[in-house]
Each structure stands twice: as structure tokens, then as C-alpha cells.
Image: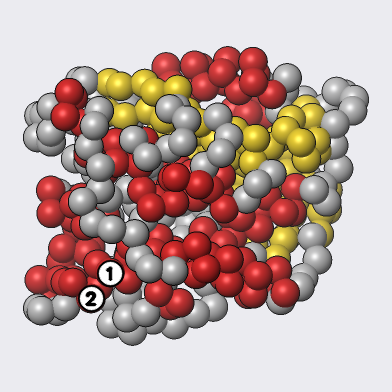
Amino acid sequence: MTLFDLPLEQLRTYRNQRPAPTGLEEFWDRTLDEARSAGGEVECLPASSGLMTVDAYDVTFPGFAGEPVKAWWLLPRGVPGQRPVVIEMLGYGGGRGLVHERLHWVSHGFAQLVMDTRGQGSTWNAGATADPHGSGPAAPGMLTRGVDHPDHLYFRRLATDAVRAVDAVRHLPGADPARIATVGHSQGGALALAAAALHPLVAATAARAPFLCGIARAASLTDLPPYGELSGYLAVHRGTAEQVLAVLEHIDVSHLAPRIACPAWVSVGLMDATCPPSGIFGAINVMPTAPELRVWPWNGHEAGGADDDAHLAAWLTDLLT
């Protein structure tokens, strides 16, 4: 890995050079109104995990269009009362997996909701949620699905699921709805920030190396997936770049970040060739309040890794407990 993006002093002032789409706020208000109007119930059933220190529940909640989304609800056993909540969003290709694979936040005393990722969960971890929507021509992967129209975007559906996960927490045993954090790495980081931008109940948000920040610039800087899916698509569908990029701006976190009203935490690796740092700084630099920022000059997409996990756990504990 090498330093390939802007130097840090320029990153600290960088802004996304592409404007937000006209009517973006109305687009998301309509999207969420339609999802909530579709109805659906939150189901929470005990799950057999064999764990001695965690009570686990198999959750189904209504997501985009009221469609069922799976999740794990994890509570520290023997800890009474309502707990602060961490909603964990997952990285690209992964699903909720098995209960014993996702114990970081519940082990720190939080109630933990592990949101499954519709249509994924077959790359590095197993998923259990379908995405019952077709797509026009698309590159392998998720980024170019639905790029013919903002309403058809895959990530419109997935970001809506993330917002509806916040809604669902209010119906789960042991949750304190006044203390909800959204967290994630990469794709999960993008979803965590989007949920914080779109749901007023989110009290804190944290993202390590978030995806979907400065999409157009990122696709011009790296051919690694997932952004490589977009550059590959545009190489085949010649002459469509401006139309496609204009559609993708609707799910670009750098355009949603000005709506994040809660405390935020972001970690960036300056050698990250998967999610280039300039796109991430383009989101950071438009947040109304500067986030708790961790910059790793010698790291790539892992950013601070386990060091970040420990720092974030302490940060959230101080903030929410």
C-alpha cells in the first residue's frame, strides 16, 4: 500500500466536488414514509446459542417496503433494566452469521442488534435476508444495482433497512430508546452514518473506513471492489457516466452527513485503496459538529482495527452509560 490520495492537510478541508441532488431531503422523507406506511410487526423470539453470559433473540423487523429483515438481539445476561443499544451494521458481502460471531458490543454491556444485510451474506459470513427486487443490467455485486433510477437503487433499500432497525429497537426487551448508537465498518460504516442522518433517535454514530462516501471520486481512484464494480460498469456502458453518477448521489453519505446531529466517531486509513480517504473526509468535513477522528497514516481499509474497537468501546461507554 502507498499514499495515493490527497495529503492530509488537503484532506482536512476537502469537500465533495459534486453537488447534492435536487430534492434529496424529499427523496429520503418519501422513501421512509413509504416504508413505515407498509406496516409490519417486530418479532423477537428466544434463540438457542449455548452461550452462558448472553441472552440471544432471533429478530425479524419490517424494512424497506415492509419486507422482513433478520437480526440478532443480544443482551448481557443478569444485567437488569434498560441498556444502551448498539446497532451493528455489517460490511460488504456479510450477513448476521451465528450468534457467537458477533459478541463485541454485548460483551461491553450494551444491548446489541446485529442487522442482517438483505441479499448479501454469502462472502465472508452467512446471511438470512432476501432482497426480493430485480435490477436492470448491473455489474456483479451491489453498487450498480438499480442505477437506472434513484427509486431502484439497492442501497436505497439497504439504508432504509438501517433506519427501520432504529425503529425496531423501541419494540425490543431491555432497550433504552434514548441511548441508541449505530456503528459499522466499511459498508456498515456507511449505513451507520446514513441511519444517524435519517433518524432523530440515534444518539451516537461511529464508522470505520466508511463506504459510499464521495462515490464518483472513489471510483476514479481505485479499481478494487466495491468501487471497481462501478468503474467496470461504466467502461461497458459507455456514455452513461453522468446519468449513473447522478443517480448514485442519492445514496452518497457525503450528501447525508450535514444531517447528522448526534456525536460521531470516524476512523480513516490514509492508505485505504478500498474506500479512498478523500471521499471519507468529504463526509467528515460537512458534519455539523466535528467527529471524534482517528487517522492512521500507515493503514489501509482496516484503519485502526482492534485499536479502534477498544477506543470506540470506551468512547461509547462514556457517552451512553
The residue type indicated by label 1 comes to Ala
Disc 2 secondary structure class: helix
Q: CA distance from mark 2 to mark 1?
A: 5 Å
What count of labels does the image hold? 2
Q: Reply above or below: 183 against 147.
A: above
Amino acid at the residue labelled 2: Gln
Q: Which mark is residue 97?
A: none
Q: Are marks 2 and 1 in contact (CB under 8 Å)?
A: yes
In this view, which residue lies farthest toward the right? 80
> Residue 108 appears at what percent x and percent y?
66, 21
Helix, strand or loop at disc 1?
A: helix
Q: Is residue 73 left or right of residue 80?
A: left
Q: Classify mark 2: residues with Cα within 10 Å, few (<14), some (14-19) or many (20+).
A: few
Residue in the picture at 29% in, 36% down: 281
* Residue 306 location (% of width, % of height): 43, 21
Q: Residue at x 14, y 49 (%)?
A: 222
At 28% from the left and 69% from the top, the residue drawn is: 246
Q: Which residue is mark 2?
A: 243
Judge the density around disc 1: few (<14), some (14-19), many (≥20) Cα neighbours within 10 Å. some
Whole-percent x, y for residue 103 in the image: 62, 31
Q: Nearer the viewer, residue 43 or 212?
A: 212
The vertical placement of 164 against 50, above or below, is below
Classify 295 as above or below 164. above
Task: Determine if residue 63 is in view.
Answer: yes
Q: Which mark is residue 246?
A: 1
Q: Is residue 111 visible?
A: no
Quarter of the C terminus within the rendering = top right
Asked if residue 136 lies left or right of residue 76, the reply is left
Quadrant housing residue 293: top left
Q: Is residue 38 left or right of residue 304?
A: right
Quadrant showing the N terminus: top left
In terms of depth relative to the viewer, which is nearer, 6 or 14? 14
